Structure formats: structure tokens, C-alpha cells
Amino acid sequence: MIDYTIKIEKALVLNEVKKTSAYIGKKLTTAEDPGAFERVSLVDANEEQLDRYWTEACSAATLALSHWQLLSKAQPLHAGDDYNVTLRLPDNWNATLGSSLQGAVASYLENMVLTQWLMIVDRGDVEAHTALATRAMAEVNRIILERVRPAKRPRPAHGGDVVVDDRRWHDDLRWYDINYWLE
């Protein structure tokens, strides 16, 4: 079994959440609603609430990954912590997808925090970001279930079939008698 640790920095995720909320606020600003940007975009005054949303999103991610989580290395999550979880994956897991796994979990956390924030300030975009979070977790599961194909057995040095005691062994392990084919 492979132990793979996912480490996601809280500051990076919350920075992306702030950028996205500012974009949504700018998009919603119209002549009828000139205060949409100030209402929707996150500022430092909302940091305490964001910490709570971060903790809830991390708990949801941990619950979703609990089947593969290495319980002996599970650590309690505090409001100011980054997200760290160690997964126990099969030996034939495709480890080249590690950065994709990190990105998918970060995307899940970002969309979960943003969904919780938008539920308070603007319910119009909640469904879209909930769908993005669901899609990100489905991608996490797809990456975790990805396996490396088994390698083929090595071929003979001279290439082709192997001859043993007047029998020729094909690469697919069938044999035939050489004399039968020479007659």
C-alpha cells in the first residue's frame, strides 16, 4: 500500500475564494443594485466566518475521503490549519496523478467555501458552485481509483518464440511441435 499525503494551504484556497467572490460581485453590479460588489466580495472583516466555512469544508472532504484515509495519521483540524490528510492507496495506484489529486481537492474546498458564503449573500450562484464542488469530488474519486496497467512480461532476448525440446513456445504461452509444421 502507498501512503499519499494531501497538503493544501488554507491561505491559497481562501485567496482564490476572495478573487472569485470579487468577480461575482463585479458581475452582479448593475444600475439597480450598485452595492452588489461590496455585499458579495469578501473582505478581511469576514475572516472569522471564512475560518468556520474552511473548517466545515475540510470536514466534508475528510468524510468523503474516509474510505482511503489512514486513521493513524489523522489529525484534528483547527480553524487556522492547512488541510493535511494521508491516504492509504493500493500499490498499483497511478502516483503520477498526485498533483491532479491535490488540485481536485483544492477545487472542492474552494467551491465548498464559496457555496457557503454565497448562501448568505447571493443565492443565484449557489447551485453552480455546488455542482462544481460535486464535480471536483467526483474527479477526486476518479483519480483515486485510477490504476497503472500491468506491465507485459519480458520477451526473449532474440525476439520471437522460444524453442525448448522441439517445441516452440509462442509469446501467448501456446506451444506447437516444430516437426509437425516442418513436414
Image (cartoon, grey):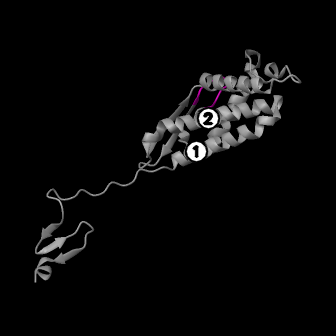
58 shown above or below 11 = below
Can residue 56 be seen from the camera position used here?
no
Asked whether residue 80 is drawn in magenta, I would say yes
**Viewer-proximal residue among 1 and 123:** 123
- Residue 41 position in % (x across, y down): 75, 22
Residue range corresponding to the magenta coloring: 76-83
Quadrant location of the C terminus in the rendered image? bottom left
Whether the residues at callouts 2 and 1 have beta carbons within 8 Å, the answer is: yes
Left or right? Give the position of 167 relative to 95. left
Give the label on residue 179, or none: none
Above-or-below relation of 87 to 34: below
- Which residue sits furthest front? 31
> What is the x, y in percent for residue 150?
36, 55
Report whether residue 40 is seen: yes
Q: Which residue is mark 1?
A: 139
Under circle 2, the secondary element is: helix
Residue found 30% across the figure and 57% down from its top: 152
- Secondary structure mostly seen in the magenta stretch: loop
Task: Name above or below for residue 170 compared with residue 13.
Answer: below
Name the residue furthest top.
44
Type of the residue with mark 2: Ser
Kindly identify the amino acid type of the residue bearing the numbered disc 1.
Answer: Glu
Instruction: Give the residue displayed 62% in from the left and 39% down from the top.
Output: 62
Q: Secondary structure at mark 1?
A: helix
- Distance Cα–Cα, label 2 vs label 1: 10 Å
Between residue 73 and residue 143, name the one nearer to us: 143
Give the quarter of the image for residue 66.
top right
Q: What's the mark number on residue 107?
A: 2
